[in-house]
Amino acid sequence: MLLVDTNVLVDVLEDDPQWADWSLGQLRAQSKIHPLVINPIIYSELSLAFSTVEALDQTIANLGLRMVELPRPALFLAGKAFVRYRRQGGTKSNVLGDFFIGAHAAVSDLPVLTRDTRRYAAYFPTVRLIAPPPSA
């Protein structure tokens, strides 16, 4: 399975002029290798772009994505990563979505398809990231 980050899906859905081609190409290529999945955090982040649950669910189905739940150890790890973030000077006061997504990937040994590697690499170094080259 491959966990698909929200930013990749938004690129495709909004036809982002800079990233849509890369993101769509990666979704197509990776779907030939891995089942593509999202979790409830990604679902929630995507919901911002939709007016109904039905429209979001249809889009998820059309993209060939499957929803998987976050294991309890991932929820625990997300909290621990957030504590590290705060101790290192992070200013956000709520656990960030990236911590839940990264912890899910770490605990379940899932690669993540993303454009934003910064927090994943810093707080979940064992997670394999599929991302554009740094110069992109």
Image: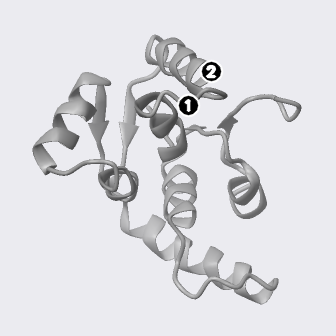
Q: Residue furthest left?
A: 54
**Residue 4 at x, y = what percent?**
48, 38
Q: Nearer the viewer, residue 13 or 118?
A: 13
118 relative position to 46: left or right: right
Closer to the N terminus: mark 2 or mark 1?
A: 1
- For the C terminus, give its image quadrant: top right
Label number found at residue 16: 1
Q: Residue at x 66, y 47 (%)?
A: 127
How many other residues sit within 10 Å of disc 1, few (<14), some (14-19) or many (≥20)? Answer: some
Depicted 109 relative to depicted 61: above or below: below
Label number found at residue 3: none
Q: Residue at x 48, y 49 (%)?
A: 108
- For the N terminus, give its image quadrant: top left
Check disc 2 and report its element: helix, strand or loop.
helix
Depicted 46 relative to depicted 87: above or below: above
Marks 2 and 1, how far apart at CA? 10 Å
Q: Which residue is drawn at 45% across and 22% down?
A: 34
Q: Nearer the viewer, residue 125 or 27?
A: 27
135 relative position to 57: left or right: right
Q: Which of 47 and 67 is in front in this view?
A: 47
Check disc 1 and report its element: helix, strand or loop.
loop
Q: Which residue is drawn at 53% across and 50% down?
A: 105
For the residues bearing labels 2 and 1, Cβ distance under 8 angstroms: no
How many other residues sit within 10 Å of disc 2, few (<14), some (14-19) or many (≥20)? Answer: some
Identity, as a three-letter code, of the amino acid under mark 2 = Trp
**Residue 24 at x, y = what percent?**
51, 19
Identity, as a three-letter code, of the amino acid under mark 1 = Asp
Depicted 110 relative to depicted 12: above or below: below
Q: Mark 2 points at which residue?
A: 22
